[in-house]
Amino acid sequence: MVFSESISSCFAKYGTFDGRASRSEFWWFYLFSLLLGWGASIAGAAAMGAAVGSVVQMIVSLVLMVPSLAVSSRRLHDTNHSGWLQLLCLTIVGAIPVIIWWAQPGIAGDNQYGPPPRS
C-alpha cells in the first residue's frame, strides 16, 4: 500500500476498529499524522506565535486521534492481538511490546479478526 492509499483507507475507515490493517497502512498513516502535526505547529507558530502553534497542533492531534486509534487496533488485529493492548502504550514499559507487535508481519491467513489486509 502506498502513502496516498494508506491515508485514504484510514480516513475511509475513520472509526472502524474491526478488521485488519497492513504494516504499510499503519506506518504510512503514522508518518502522515506526525508530519501533519509538525506542519500545523510550524505554520501556526509562524503565523501567530508559539502559543497558537501549540493550539493548532493540538486541534490536528484531536482530529487524528480516532483514526490513529482505529488503525492501531486493526494493526494489532493483523498480528492476532487484541486492539485493547494498545492501552499498554500508556506506560513506558508497555509501549515496547506494542511497538514490536506493530512492526511484526501479520498472520498470513485468516485469523479471528478476519481475512488478511491487501498490501
Image (tube, rainbow, N blue to C red):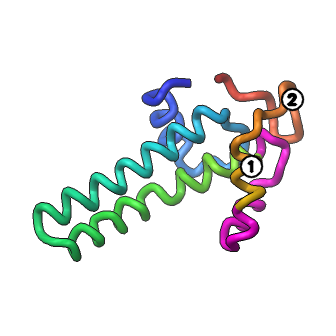
> Quick one: SS at disc 2?
loop
Q: Of residues 5 and 17, which is closer to you in this image?
A: 5
Residue 110 marker: 2
Q: In this view, does 113 lie above or below 108?
A: below
The residue under the point 67% across, 37% down is 21
Q: Which quarter of the rendering shows the C terminus?
A: top right
The tag earlier along the polypeptide, 2 or 1, is: 1
For the magenta stretch, what is the residue range? 77-95
Residue 92 marker: none
Q: Position of residue 29 (x, y in %)?
A: 50, 42
By secondary structure, the bulk of the magenta-drawn segment is best described as helix
Is 31 situated left or right of 58 in this image?
right
Q: Is residue 104 above or below residue 118?
A: below
Is 81 situated left or right of 18 in this image?
right
Q: Position of residue 63 (x, y in %)?
A: 41, 59
The quarter holding residue 4 reads top left
Viewer-side label of 2, 1: 1
Amino acid under disc 1: Ile
Q: Of residues 37 and 114, which is closer to you in this image?
A: 37
Amino acid under disc 2: Asp
